[in-house]
Image (cartoon, helix red, strand yellow):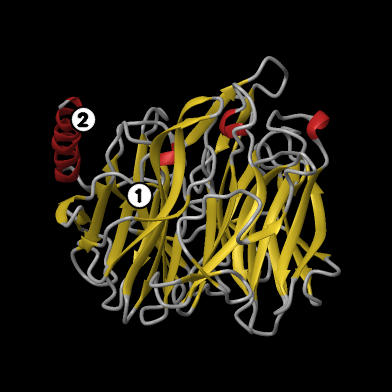
Amino acid sequence: MKRSISLLLFAVISMQTFAQLKQDDGYRGIWYSIGRTNNEYTYKYGGGLGTYPSNHYPFAVYAPKVQKTFFCYGGTDTAGTTLYHEVGYFDHATGMVSRPVLVLDKQTDDAHDNPVLQVDRDGHIWLFSTSHGTSRPSFIHKSNRPYDISAFTRIHPTKMENGQAVPLDNFSYLQVYYDAEEGFLALFTHYEQKQLRYGRKNCRVIAYMKSRDGITWSAWKDIANMEEGHYQTSGQSGKRIGTAFNHHPNVRTGAGLDYRTNLYYLYTDDFGESWKTADGKTVNLPLLETGKTGLVKDYAAEKKNVYINDVNFDADGHPVILYETSKGPEPGPQNGPYQWYTARWTGRDWDVRPFTASDHNYDMGSLMIGEDGSWRVVAPTDAGPQRYNTGGEIVMWLSKDHGRHWSREKQLTQQSERNHSYPRRTVNGHPGFYAFWADGNGRKPSVSRLYFADLQGHVFRLPEKMTRPMMKPEKTGE
């Protein structure tokens, strides 16, 4: 009963917010932190997290028909007190960016509620407003006209549950994919109470659902439900969708979700009708046993934490996973090295190779694989002004031999005032809008600016103040 009243209240708030849909006056990212520490690093992680977390995707989609990249982000008001779900676009023909449209005030400052975006075959823009757990509802909005962000309508989706259609009003850590023939397939997290060896836990279960029209969704089907749960990060190549995930071991009282280990991988070629391991063996879902089916590498044996950044595919449709390991969740040099790796399926086995090192567990980056077979990683792998805090200075790395050797192709940011974090790649990425991210102070609340880079390594800052409907982004000297 309490949940029903809470959802009704949020629905009323949402409709009031929707009635006030308007263009914002500039680009301001959300600043967010979690996990207060008793040392100089202040937080487990924090900073400008408008494109956080790695388990949300995509934030940007290129639409070739209109030569525009549409993007969303977690914005905020001028006081930085609430999370706005905002949408903008970059016009590749003119080199200009639109004023952002404020679609929803999420009534929280939690960046885990950041939105994701997709574009359907007719050009309508879909905004999926996620939630962090079950205390807040989730929403879906659809643009009123194709390739047009000026007006959105709230969708009232349903899902199947016990043979009946019920409201789809809550989902977390969403990664949503689109196929012109199949429609939407979404990977996400839901929460389930379980009695485990070390007490009753609210566990994070990874699952998927699908819909042809974005309104009527299938029943939820679990992918994995091991011990205390999982984080998953995924990617798409045509009709192939692959997910990489870790798990939270129930190893002792108080261990909790900060402990995440092992690396697993599964994929589907038929939009969720069946799921397979990398070698093509069909599996029965959900996976329940740790260290078994789908295991890429056993990090529990090494007592290492695993943070998954991205999943992409080579020309043969083989997955490449970009991830990071450390000795533990707390920030600082004691848990280093914060070692980055790539894991590539060769067609026979997993080729796991060290890539580089950084100074924080949440130094997330993205993996781009070109048609020529080149691999690029855009990531904050250099120490920033807030050393051992989230993010840093962003580097574009290049490998031409499947991750065996890497070179620093371009330093994208340097001598910054604030750490840069969570650079994200674009669906159908255009070289003119190659990576998209935000900055922010890792140790104290600050302003957060939004940036994008092109393939040549030029960096552009989105306008903090928009005086016209379309403006040129500022090319930085960094």
Q: Are there few (<14), some (14-19), or many (20+) residues within 10 Å of tag 1? A: many
Residue 217: % across, % down: 24, 61
Residue 94: % across, % down: 44, 73
| Quadrant position of residue 432 | bottom right
- Label 2 and label 1: CA atoms lie apart by 27 Å
* First along the sequence among labels 2 and 1: 2
Give the residue displayed 79% in from the left and 71% down from the top.
Answer: 399
State the SS at label 1: strand
**Circle 1 is placed at which residue position?**
86
Give the residue displayed 27% in from the left and 39% down from the top.
Answer: 137
Asked if residue 44 can be seen in this view, the reply is: yes
Q: Is residue 446 above or below residue 278?
A: above
Asked if residue 478 can be seen in this view, the reply is: no
The label nearer to you, 2 versus 1, is 2
Amino acid type, residue under disc 2 in the picture: Arg
**Circle 2 is placed at which residue position?**
3
Q: Which image quadrant: the N terminus?
A: top left
Of the pair 173 and 425, the residue shown nearer to us: 173
Q: Are there few (<14), some (14-19), or many (20+) residues within 10 Å of tag 2? A: few
State the SS at label 2: helix
Residue 289: % across, % down: 57, 50
- Asked whether, in this view, residue 430 is left or right of residue 399, the answer is left
Q: Which label is found at residue 453?
A: none
Amino acid type, residue under disc 1 in the picture: Glu
Of the pair 199 and 269, the residue shown nearer to us: 199
